[in-house]
Image: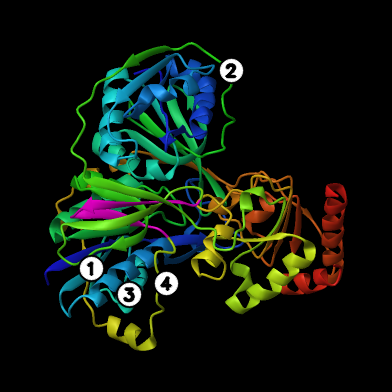
């Protein structure tokens, strides 16, 4: 293997339709969380696997890493089924309560151990959406970095990569970046594949290593609340504005919608 | 540590409007911060933006002549770090923007500043800063604090505060920094092409479709419906990313803002925060969605919980 791409992924959580806040008021009760691989990370993984598949057999290795308790294995197995070569999960109870920066500290330590040529992370997570983990890894590593990349040109072992960042309002910006680098990947950069039944079976045989903090040279104080730059004080369900609901059969609802549109058009005319 | 430092944001020679919102936020927090409000401008010709940020609430403007006209994360990190060392603010305000995604995490992680992003409310309690942001797809609010951090850096959601107004005469000083060697070399800007000549920013009546349509073959019936209604057909991100409609029809943060829109009908759009950023200001929003818990209903004026295909078919009969 001459080139290695490390993809940092997260097992995110979405909420059940009815959910309750935990007794300590700092998070949602875990019973109401529906877990899945972060959507952005799916695109990041696909981009790495695409580079691997375009290169000669055995030239590029794709390693996925996640920081999480046992349940994160599910996300990692999914990545292995979609083409990653091996997976690493890091956990210690001391990691609980970590913000995105403390998680980045763990991922930085894994990067130093793995010495990849590129690190990919999703541009943000769907649950807490800090949009900062990937770039924090880069800062801690001291590596060049680019955020919200929606097109990438990279040849294995190259000293630089061509990236296109997605800015606001339909504006894009192209640039060259020195490698090794950390890139955060935006939705739409590719079309992530579905894992086939066969690949899911094969993934079960791929290596998934579990590491503790000592394995990556971190102490308990460098993670969790003490290693974080923010701390959750309170989580609550906000009072939200609520639309005036149009009830009735589909025909009745559509008739009212038609009336709203006709009223608007009457005003506009 | 006192006072508030605001980092102005500019792109292609124009100050970004969100900078004025940060000034408004800082004005409200000024007494809590116990010090001046300072706006810093980093760029090759920072003086060009001095007038634009000389608004009520600003005490001082600091110019940092560094970098190229294009955003460079290393230059920005070095400049903001130097500004924090020079002015010792207790609070630093940035915009939660794509450029800020590109450096804020690295700055905070390496310097150990208190840090939160996508913040829409800032409070000061018992000498400590508190920030409120969303969680789990905006279904909860999360209040965070920063124990033991003397400097807190917050990236504030665009639109969370109104822009500051009124002319002021702040003092203008400059700060010299040692610019790092660039590791990114910007090439060019590319506008998402308008493949079919549509301009979402000028459309007054938009009907947008989202993930709820399920498959590409359904696009046609909504295109037909939009034509019958006299609406411009728009979409949310997944539809454009799948190539079902051109990117030029995408409404949202990374797509187009429905600036001129007066009536917005959202069909099968759950209402991700990035989509809402492009349309929540519209006066009359009607949302049709199968999920009664969809976020779109929190910004819509009228809501219909139902099957979008049935509603669409019934609606077609009225026009």
What crowding class fits label 4: few (fewer than 14 Cα within 10 Å), some (14-19), or many (20 or more)? few
Residue sitting at the far front: B197
Q: Nearer the viewer, mark 2 or mark 3?
A: 2
> Looking at the image, do the residues carrying marks 2 and 3 touch, with CB atoms under 8 Å apart?
no
Q: Which residue is mark 3?
A: A77
Q: Quick check: do tags 4 and 1 share a chain?
A: yes
Q: Quick check: do tags 4 and 3 share a chain?
A: yes
Callout count: 4
What crowding class fits label 2: few (fewer than 14 Cα within 10 Å), some (14-19), or many (20 or more)? few
Marks 1 and 3 sit apart, C-alpha to C-alpha, by: 12 Å
What crowding class fits label 1: few (fewer than 14 Cα within 10 Å), some (14-19), or many (20 or more)? many
Q: Position of residue A57 (x, y in %)?
A: 17, 80
Marks 4 and 2 sit apart, C-alpha to C-alpha, by: 48 Å
Q: Nearer the viewer, mark 1 or mark 3?
A: 1
Frontmost residue, B178 versus A117: B178
The region drawn magenta spans: A170-186
> Looking at the image, do the residues carrying marks 4 and 1 touch, with CB atoms under 8 Å apart?
no
Q: Which residue is mark 4?
A: A191
Q: Which mark is residue B166?
A: 2
Q: Secondary structure at mark 3?
A: helix
B164 vs B155, left or right, is right
Q: Which mark is residue A63?
A: 1
- Name the N-terminal-most of marks 4 and 1: 1
Q: Main secondary structure of the magenta part?
A: strand
B96 vs A154, left or right, is right
A150 vs B233, left or right, is left
Write the residue at 15% across / 57% down. A159
Write the residue at 34% across / 14% down. B173
Q: Position of residue A167 (x, y in %)?
A: 43, 48
């Amino acid at each position: 293997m001459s080139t290695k791409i490390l993809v940092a992924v997260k097992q995110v959580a979405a909420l059940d339709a009815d959910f309750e806040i935990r007794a300590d008021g700092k998070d949602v009760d875990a019973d109401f969380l529906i877990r899945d691989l972060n959507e952005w990370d799916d695109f990041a993984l696909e981009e790495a696997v695409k580079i691997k598949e375009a290169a000669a057999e055995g030239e590029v290795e794709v390693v996925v890493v996640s920081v999480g308790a046992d349940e994160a294995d599910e996300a990692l197995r999914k990545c292995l089924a979609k083409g990653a070569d091996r997976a690493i999960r890091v956990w210690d109870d001391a990691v609980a309560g970590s913000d995105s920066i403390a998680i980045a500290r763990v991922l930085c330590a894994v990067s130093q151990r793995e010495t990849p040529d590129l690190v990919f992370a999703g541009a943000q997570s769907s649950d807490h959406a800090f949009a900062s983990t990937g770039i924090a890894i880069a800062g801690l590593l001291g590596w060049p970095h680019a955020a919200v990349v929606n097109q990438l040109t990279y040849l294995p072992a190259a000293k630089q990569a061509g990236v296109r960042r997605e800015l606001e309002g339909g504006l894009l910006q192209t640039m060259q970046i020195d490698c090794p680098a950390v890139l955060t990947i935006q939705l739409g950069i590719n079309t992530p594949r579905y894992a086939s039944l066969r690949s899911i079976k094969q993934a079960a045989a791929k290596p998934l290593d579990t590491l503790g903090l000592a394995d990556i040279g971190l102490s308990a104080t460098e993670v969790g609340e003490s290693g974080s730059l923010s701390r959750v004080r309170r989580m609550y369900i906000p009072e939200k504005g609520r639309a005036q609901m149009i009830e009735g059969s589909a025909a009745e609802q559509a008739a009212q919608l038609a009336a709203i549109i006709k009223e608007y058009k009457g005003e506009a005319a | 540590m006192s006072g508030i430092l605001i980092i102005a944001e500019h792109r292609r020679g124009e100050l970004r409007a969100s900078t004025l919102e940060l000034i408004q936020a800082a004005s409200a927090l000024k007494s809590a911060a116990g010090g001046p409000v300072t706006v810093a401008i980093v760029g090759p010709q920072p003086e060009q933006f001095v007038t634009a940020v000389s608004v009520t609430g600003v005490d001082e403007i600091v110019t940092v002549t560094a970098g190229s006209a294009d955003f460079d994360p290393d230059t920005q990190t070095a400049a903001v770090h130097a500004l924090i060392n020079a002015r010792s603010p207790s609070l630093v305000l940035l915009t939660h923007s794509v450029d800020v995604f590109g450096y804020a995490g690295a700055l905070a992680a390496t310097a150990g500043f208190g840090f939160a992003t996508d913040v829409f409310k800032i409070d000061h309690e018992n000498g400590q800063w508190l920030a409120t942001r969303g969680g789990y797809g905006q279904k909860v609010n999360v209040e965070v604090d920063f124990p033991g951090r003397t400097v807190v850096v917050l990236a504030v959601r665009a639109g969370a505060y109104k822009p500051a107004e009124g002319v002021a005469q702040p003092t203008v000083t400059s700060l010299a920094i040692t610019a790092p060697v660039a590791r990114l070399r910007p090439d060019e800007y590319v506008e998402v092409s308008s493949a079919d000549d549509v301009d979402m920013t000028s459309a007054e009546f938009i009907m947008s479709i989202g993930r709820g349509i399920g498959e590409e073959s359904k696009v046609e019936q909504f295109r037909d419906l939009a034509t019958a209604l006299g609406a411009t057909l728009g979409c949310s991100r997944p539809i454009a990313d799948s190539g079902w409609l051109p990117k030029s029809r995408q409404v949202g943060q990374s797509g187009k803002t429905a600036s001129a829109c007066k009536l917005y009908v959202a069909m099968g759009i759950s209402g991700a925060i990035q989509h809402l950023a492009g349309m929540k200001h519209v006066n009359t929003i009607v949302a049709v969605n199968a999920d009664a818990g969809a976020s779109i209903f929190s910004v819509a004026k009228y809501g219909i919980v139902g099957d979008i295909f049935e509603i669409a078919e019934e609606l077609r009969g009225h026009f």
